[in-house]
Amino acid sequence: MDEPVRAAGVVAALTAVTVSVAHFLAVFVFDRDQPWLQAGTADSLWEWAATSALGLCALAAAALALSGDVARPRWTVVAVGLFLAFLADAFAVSDRVGNAANAGIVLVLAVVLVLLWSLAKTLGPSASTARVALVLLVGSVAFRVAEPLFDSLDLEHGDVAYEAKVVAKHVLELTGWLLLALALVPVALSRSRGPARRAAAEDGGTG
């Protein structure tokens, strides 16, 4: 196992433990009096962190699309898709509109994840971290798709099975976006500085 994958595994494990402990404490010890500790609430710290990481991924993809990369068309589609997903999360579109919006978000994310998998090999040392992130995000999308199935099981708030489902979904989502941001942002910053360095070198050569 290479170092980036090992590091990604550590991040995933720490995130899973932290979110799980905080959520179950909020539900079963504090009796939901601390909604910011819970996964899946409007005031959730974890929801805010996941949405922020998604926004960073969108900005990094936009920077890569503007950097003159040979894969510019694919990065452009990824950036647009990630911005749409970010807006949907930030404004809780699925909660406001319902299953139709959820299906649209799933479709957008599916396209984005397929494109990102094909682009991972262009990320150099960050490729392994990106692939781990994408696997986790596929899992979070699978939870979105299976939401009607979970609803049919008549699980209720306070049931251990229901709370475990909530935690699993949000851990996959949060960890996936965090790792993807860690993979994309350094590459985007490095490639964005490249044209400026070349321009400076050219100016120096002609001076």
Image: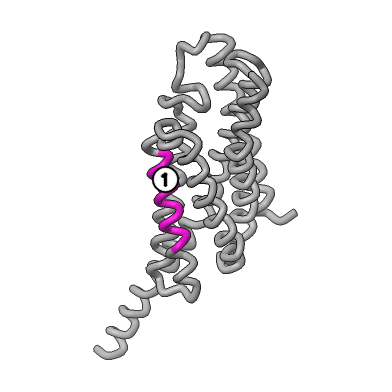
Q: Is residue 39 left or right of residue 206?
A: right
Q: Quadrant of residue 203?
A: bottom left
Task: Farthest residue to the right: give it.
Answer: 1
In magenta stretch: residue 82: yes
Residue at left 55%, top 14%? Answer: 27
In magenta stretch: residue 140: no
Task: Farthest residue to the bottom: give it.
Answer: 206
Q: Residues within 10 Å of mark 1 (few under 14, many from 20)?
A: many
What x and y, as percent, mark residue 26?
A: 53, 15
Which of 53 and 85 lies nearest the eye of the viewer?
85
Which of 22 and 113 lies nearest the eye of the viewer?
113
Residue at left 43%, top 58%? Answer: 79
What x and y, as percent, mark residue 59?
A: 39, 55
Q: Is residue 61 left or right of residue 162?
A: left
Main SS type for the magenta part? helix
Q: Amino acid at mark 1?
A: Phe
What x and y, as percent, mark residue 24?
A: 59, 18
Q: Which residues are magenta?
A: 77-89
Which of 140 and 62 lies nearest the eye of the viewer?
140
